[in-house]
Image: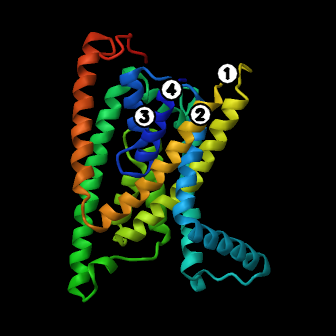
Amino acid sequence: MDMFSAIIQGIVQGLTEFLPVSSSGHLAICQHLFGMDDNNLFFSVMLHIGTLAAVLAVYFKLVVKLLKAVCLMIKDIFTGKFKWSEMDGERNLAMMLIIGLLPLFLLFLPIPGTGMKIKDAAENFSKDGYFIVVGFSLLITSLLLFLGNRKNKKTVAFYTSKGRTAENAGRRRYNVVDALTVGLTQCVAAIFPGVSRSGSTLAASQFRGMNKQVALDYSFLLGTPAIVAAALLEGKEALFPDDGNRVSMDFLPIIVGMIFAAFVGFLAIKLFKWLLSTDRMSIFIIYTAVVGAIVVIISIVELASGTNLFTHNPLSF
């Protein structure tokens, strides 16, 4: 991998991991346009670590408080002092994050007759021949963002009619149904490149009537353990492949890509929070709709010709 490719993929990963436009979808687009190598699992792991660093930089104090809350809850459970009804805000958030992660285990279920697990479908959808899936997934992201934004406006109107400010509109504590709904949405986003994880989970929370800033914080925090899990799984596969053949790696481009992913990711989180607070979600709704439509059109032309329009290579399935 050359330095240019590493920088481009690092920027794309950092920017799109947190903005509601789908990092997997945009990486698939970059790989499709420039013929970039999409099989370097170790590089993918390092990009995930870069984006993880961005989340921890923004939410460091809250993450420390949540880890402390989890430890205290475990202590109370073993000493018989734990009471669900008496959880404070931090313990409630920690518990709802744990519950929201449970649906991720569904990704490890086998797909009958294929020899694959559900999570493996995402790799196939990223191939040239399935480029159209990326396009339709981006259109789905646009629709989810539109519906979530419309629901949020209704939530704000309801709460402001009761004397609350727009910033404080919506519920601020998750319940089990909220957490499972958002967790299942995250699973779907993990399967289809083009369905934004942050965008779809934000929309799911808004459908449940949550405060939009609380919903965004929950979405970012919920993604943190998922990023760690992805890094561990991909790291194991990259360093200890089943066939025993390790891929040779040039570490300098990998480190540079990780740094770009972390820095751009930090800025993307701050940008997203500001855009959400100022009701500028229409930017992402329009963007994902336009890019999705363009990808679908390109895909139809390529499927008819059987070749990638940009690299001129035969489509892979």
Amino acid carrying label 4: it is Asp
Q: Pinpoint residue 87: horizontal percent, then vertical percent.
A: 59, 82
Amino acid carrying label 2: it is Ile
| Residue under the point 71% across and 31% down | 239
Q: Pointer 1: what residue? A: 248
First in sequence: mark 2 vs mark 3: 3
Q: Residues within 10 Å of mark 4 (few under 14, many from 20)?
A: some
Q: Pointer 3: what residue? A: 27
First in sequence: mark 1 vs mark 2: 1
Q: Pointer 2: what residue? A: 254
First in sequence: mark 1 vs mark 3: 3
Amino acid carrying label 1: it is Ser
Place residue 39 in its image quadrant.
top right
| Residue under the point 43% across and 24% down | 127
* Element assignment for label 4: loop
CB atoms at circles 1 and 3 under 8 Å apart?
A: no
Q: Pinpoint residue 101: horizontal percent, then vertical percent.
A: 56, 57
Q: Pointer 4: what residue? A: 38
Q: Pinpoint residue 293: horizontal percent, then vertical percent.
A: 22, 34
Q: Nearer the viewer, mark 2 or mark 4?
A: 2
Place residue 311 in its image quadrant.
top left
Q: Quadrant of the N terminus?
A: top right
First in sequence: mark 3 vs mark 4: 3
Res 187 seen here = yes
Vertical relation: 200 (above or below) 9: below
| Residue under the point 26% across and 67% down | 278
**How far apart are the alpha carbons under marks 2 and 3?**
15 Å
Q: Nearer the viewer, mark 1 or mark 2?
A: 2
Q: Quadrant of the C terminus?
A: top left
CB atoms at circles 3 and 4 under 8 Å apart?
A: yes
**How far apart are the alpha carbons under marks 1 and 2?**
12 Å
